[in-house]
Every structure is written in C-alpha cells, then in structure tokens.
Image: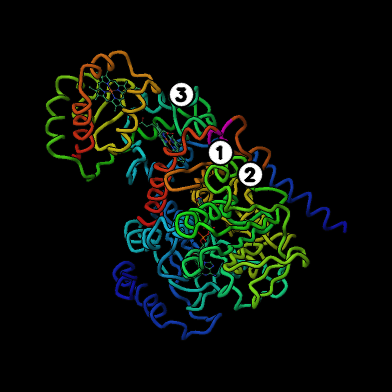
Amino acid sequence: MKHRWKYAVAAYAITISAAALAVEPDAAMLSNACAGCHGTYGGSAGPSMPSLAGHSKTAIVEAMKKFKSGERPSSIMGRLAKGYTDQQIELMGEYFSKQKIHFTNQKVDLAKAKRGAELQEEHCSRCHLDDGKEGKDDTPVMASQWLPYLQMQMELYQTGKRKMPERMAEKVKPLSPADIEALLHFYAGVNK
Amino acid sequence: MTLNRRDFLKVVGGASSLALAGCAAQAPAVSSGSAAEIMPKTGRRVVVVGGGYGGTIAAKYVRMMDKSIEVVLIERNDHFVSCPFSNLYLGGLLPDLSSLTIKYDKLIANHGIKFVQAEVTGIDPAAHVVITDKGRLKYDRLIISPGIDFRTEEIKGYDAKTPEIMPHAWKAGPQTVLLRKQLEAMKDGGTVVISVPLAPFRCPPGPYERASMIAWYLKHNKPNSKVIILDANPDLVSKGALFRKGWDMHYKNIIDYRKAAKVTEIDVGKKAVLIEGLDEVRGDVVNLIPPQRAADIAVKADLVGDDKRWCPIDANTFESKKHKDIHVIGDASIAGAMPKSGYSANSEAKVCATNVVRLMNGQPVMSLSGINTCYSYIAKGEAISVAAVYAVKDGAIIAVPNSGGVSPADWSQAKTEAIYAESWLKNILTEMSS
Ligand SMILES: Cc1cc2nc3c(=O)[nH]c(=O)nc-3n(C[C@H](O)[C@H](O)[C@H](O)COP(=O)(O)OP(=O)(O)OC[C@H]3O[C@@H](n4cnc5c(N)ncnc54)[C@H](O)[C@@H]3O)c2cc1C
C-alpha cells in the first residue's frame, strides 16, 4: 500500500509538471485543426469549401474577426472563430498567408470566364489584384477559389446578409447578374 | 484498383522492400507472433497502427514535420471505407460505397510512408516491438488508432453469426451493404428496429442520423413502414432538440423514438430484441448496434484503463498512461471533451504527431489545440451540425468556453450545411489519402 501511494504521488507530480511545461500552441498546431475542412495547408479539394492557402494575413484575420463578432454570416465559422483569441487568429492568418495558392482544375464555362476577364479589368481589379491572385488589404484571394463558394458568398452579399465593402458595392451594383456570374467563372478558372 | 505487391515494391524501394514484399505477399503463411523482423530498424522510427481516420493523418503529419523519422503504417486491409456518409448510402442517397472508399497508394508515395498490410496481434512495450501476423517491427514510438470493437458479451444470445442477421453496420463495409440489402428486401409496412447502446460509443449523433436516413428511404419507397429507435440512453446523446425537430418536420409517422430502452437480450431466430430482458420488440430489419470499447488490440496490449474499455492518455501527447512510448488516438482513447468522431480522430492525430516529433527531437511538449465538427443529414439536402474548439486546462481536454455549439434551431442553415458537409467529407478523405 505504502509503495503504491508513493508511486502514485510521483506519477502525479510528473504529469503536472509536464502539463505545466507545455508550450502554447503555435501557428501550425492551431491551423492544422482547420485542415479537416479546408484541406492540408489550407488547399481545399472542393467542391464548395473555400481554400485559405495564399490569402493575405489581413484577409484571414479580418474574416475571422467578422465571423467571431457575427458581422459576417456563416453556417459554422462563427461557432468556431469564437474559440480563438485575437492573438491566435493572427498566428493562423500568418500561417495561411505563407502557403502557396491552391490552384484547381475545376470546370468553368469558358465563354463566361472570357467575358469575366474583360469585366475584371475595369470593375474589380482595384482590389482583386492580378487576376484575383492577390488582394488589396483585407481582400481575399479569388483565383481558383471554388465556384459554388463564390456563388454562395455573392448571394449573401446580394441579399444583404453579408455586408459588402462600400467601394465594392459601387462596382457590383451596376453589373447584371450575368456579368457577376461571368466574373465568378473567371476567378474560379484562374489556375496559374 | 487495389494495392498489389508491385505497388509495395515501387513505393518502398531499396533494400528493405525485399523483406517487406516477401512478408506482405505471402498472406497468412507465417503464424501469429512470428519472430521474423519485417524491416530491420536503422534510424529513428514511428510505427502507426490503423489506416483509418486517425492513423493515416498521424503517419502523414509525422512525415510532414520531420522527414528524418521513418514512418511505418500497419493496416489489416488494403483500403478503408469511411463510416461518415455511410448513413446516406443506407438512405439511398449514395449508389454505393465507392465515394467513401480510400486507398493508400498516393498517401504513402507522397510522404514516403512505408505501408505494411498486416494484422497486429500484440505489442511488447518493454522491447518496443509490434507483433503482426507477417512478422515483427521495432519502433521508437508507437501511435495506435485502431478504432472500436464490441462488448457483445453484454447481450444475451449474441454470437459470432448474429451480425449476419442483425447487422451493426458500425464499421463501414460489408456490414453496411448487408443492412442496405435488408432494407431493400423489406416489404412496405415493415418495421426497422435500431438499437442504440449506452454512451460512450463511436459517433454520438450517428444512430439518429441513421434513423433519419432510413426514414427518408422508407418515406419515399415504403411509406407504410416504421423505424423504432430503442435508445439505451436517458435521451438522445447528441443534437437532441434538432433531431426531434427534423423528425417532426419529416418523419412524424415513421420514427418512433423510445428512450431508456436498453437491449440486453436477443432472439435472432424471431428477429426480436428484449428490453431489459422483458419487453420484446420484433423487427423485419434489426440494426443492432452493440455497446463498444477500444479495439481488440488495445485491450490485448493492456492499454485500456480500469474500466477495461477505453485507453487513458496524456491530454497533450496522447501517450498512454499505461505504457511508455505508446500513443493512443481516435475512438479508442479517452480524450476528455473530444467526442469519438472522425474529425476528432483527425485533429488528435495532428496534435499527437506534433508532440511525438517534438519529444523525439528533445523539444518541450506543445499544448493541444483541436477541433471537432459532426454534420448529420436529416433529409436529402438538409443537414445539422455540432462544432467545438478544444484546449487543455489543468491536464484535461476541455471545450473552449463560449464557443462552438449546434446549428441554429430555426433551420436557416440546414441547406447550406448539407452543401458544406459534402465538401467536408471530400476534404477529410483527401487529407487521409494524399
Ligand atoms: C454510421 C456512422 C457515421 C459516422 N459519421 C461521422 C461523421 O459524420 N463525422 C465524424 O467526424 N465521424 C463520424 N463517425 C465516426 C468515425 O467513423 C470514427 O470516429 C472514426 O472512424 C474514428 O477513427 P479511428 O482512427 O479511431 O478508427 P477507424 O477510422 O475505424 O480506423 C481504425 C483502423 O484500424 C485498423 N485496425 C484495427 N485493429 C487493427 C489491427 N489489430 N491490425 C491492423 N489494423 C487494425 C482498422 O482496420 C481500421 O482501418 C461515424 C461513425 C459511424 C459508425
């Protein structure tokens, strides 16, 4: 009995000290947990889950903060974003910004994509830079993003559930639904 | 396509492939506990047992984090069939199990993982040796994610042949196909009995999703039929309010939910189950899901705790509290607040891999950060979910306060979630297979 008691105390002490010594989760530890939905390194296999790889740190951080506060509507991200501190969100933003854009070979309507390419230059390229491969400030990467995701998000904007940046709204409003559709096909089809 | 010997040779390459191919090819010629060493260990090595939701990811992430560590993945089958979404197949929403089946060829080639198809029959923790029906393997650290097996001894009248009549379909594959065939063969006006064991069991919302999907099939094909759920638990174990709402909306006259109805005895010949050995309920189809525990190998290797069922582990490293240098993840482990789900197994595998690599490199342990999400389909194109973020506090895995939760009760996200759930499956299976 006596021996067993001693052993238990020793084992307990080891457990406690190991847990106490554990370092805080780093960027990879935090971000790996997202990959079950968003894909390894944030490259989504589709068909509707968005890729995170290659987005700027600001884009990820702003999206997460808006999910967390409820400003941006979501089916699931709001519930998850609430589980992280602002500092952890910054770490994840940095992690995904360091990954290469996940180019896809999804099917798009080529005629629409061609029309979209023309519209992009005039209407959207101020913020959705370089064919959507880059984004100004908190603008997300659009190149190769999954088409159903872009369509669902555009629908949220158009129905007023997701708040469009004012400057973007100015550009989007004059365009017809067919033009918008064309732009989304264009972005989804950019794959190099 | 299945992996064959040539694939092994191609992937493994080099001198060790000779030993591996020699053993892997000669089916069960070598008896259990063979003394032959499959691949002599030269450098640092992690062995992973189980090529399911946890094991594939642990093997992959160890290699992603440290290429200097050799990783050997041992799995009894040459492919894996996902339980997630197998309920949709039962409901007739998937034509077969092919979209739920993964192979290992890309995973092992992309990450330089060595694959051994073998049955693990024992573990020698002192000698750091895994014993298989094809020979032995030495390890520095062992990660096991073997899933579950059943406590069938708790059901009177249950024997080895019972699942052929009363399928559990709680491991996806032939059992799932059998249950589907029984549903197809059942006459309109028939009764399907689903028996749910006491928690904890694999996938807390799983039985209720299954009831929903079977009810969906019956409603559209055999509308006079019924689903009786006999739940051993005091109430639905997961997403109760949402399931009830969904059943009210879609299956009012089909699903008959009975709580605190524990099946303790069966009469296979009569296709009857007995609640607490008394009330008899007969079904044309009986989906008997027995109570569960960690898979046989975990019990055999003395990794289960005082309950003799599940494996106690350290909350950050998943190292067994029973044996040093052996880590247990997935359904088999007691992972605090993290439920027994595929997403949990995936998340735990990454945390475990991180800390296995850190320990092998003499770095301090890193605190766990994990996620779980379980989507459940209620009807075609309608799904609900539960989600949570996890951290470690005072040595235990807890859900981060004021986060997570279930889908909104107003059903506003059900269609959107059904769309994203499909992508979830695609992404998690892609993670496991590439
Ligand atoms: C109907 C149903 C629906 C579900 N739906 C969901 C869902 O929507 N979302 C979700 O997240 N989870 C879901 N789950 C739960 C999920 O399937 C499990 O939690 C998950 O598979 C656990 O992973 P694991 O690695 O512990 O075990 P598994 O994935 O079962 O992997 C274990 C592997 O180990 C191998 N193995 C075992 N013993 C040995 C041995 N001795 N030698 C060699 N190989 C061995 C097995 O062959 C198997 O391949 C569902 C489960 C069911 C039954």
User: In percent of the image, x 63 and y 39: which residue is there?
Assistant: B398
Q: Position of residue B39 (x, y in %)?
A: 43, 72
In the depicted structure, whether residue B200 falls above or below residue B188: above
Are the residues flagged by discs 2 and 1 in contact, CB closer than 8 Å? yes
Residue type at mark 1 is Ala
User: Label 2 lies in what chain?
Assistant: B
Work out how far the residue at label 2 is from the one at label 1, CA to CA, in angstroms.
10 Å
For the residues tagged 1 and 3, is the chain the same? no
| Secondary structure of the residue carrying numbered label 1 | strand
Residue most toward the right?
A: A1
Specify which label sits upstream in the sequence, 2 or 1: 2
Query: Which label is found at residue A65?
Result: 3
Q: Would you name the residue on which mark 2 appears?
A: B337
Residue type at mark 3 is Lys
Mark 3 surroundings: few (<14), some (14-19) or many (≥20) residues within 10 A: some
Q: Where is residue B32 in the image (x, y as percent from the top left)?
A: 55, 81
Nearest to the observer: residue B273 or residue A19: B273
Nearest to the observer: residue B327 or residue B117: B117
Answer whether residue B354 is visible to the viewer in this image: no
Question: Magenta segment, principal secondary structure?
Answer: loop
Work out how far the residue at label 1 is from the one at label 3, CA to CA, in angstroms.
17 Å
Q: Splitting the image into 4 quarters, where does residue B117 fall?
A: bottom left
Mark 2 surroundings: few (<14), some (14-19) or many (≥20) residues within 10 A: some
The residue stretch that appears in magenta: B403-409
User: In percent of the image, x 41 and y 25: which residue is there?
Assistant: A61
Residue type at mark 2 is Ala
Are the residues flagged by discs 2 and 3 in contact, CB closer than 8 Å? no
User: Label 1 lies in what chain?
Assistant: B
Residue most toward the bottom?
A: B29
Q: Would you name the residue on which mark 1 appears?
A: B388
Q: Where is residue B226 in the image (x, y as percent from the top left)?
A: 58, 58
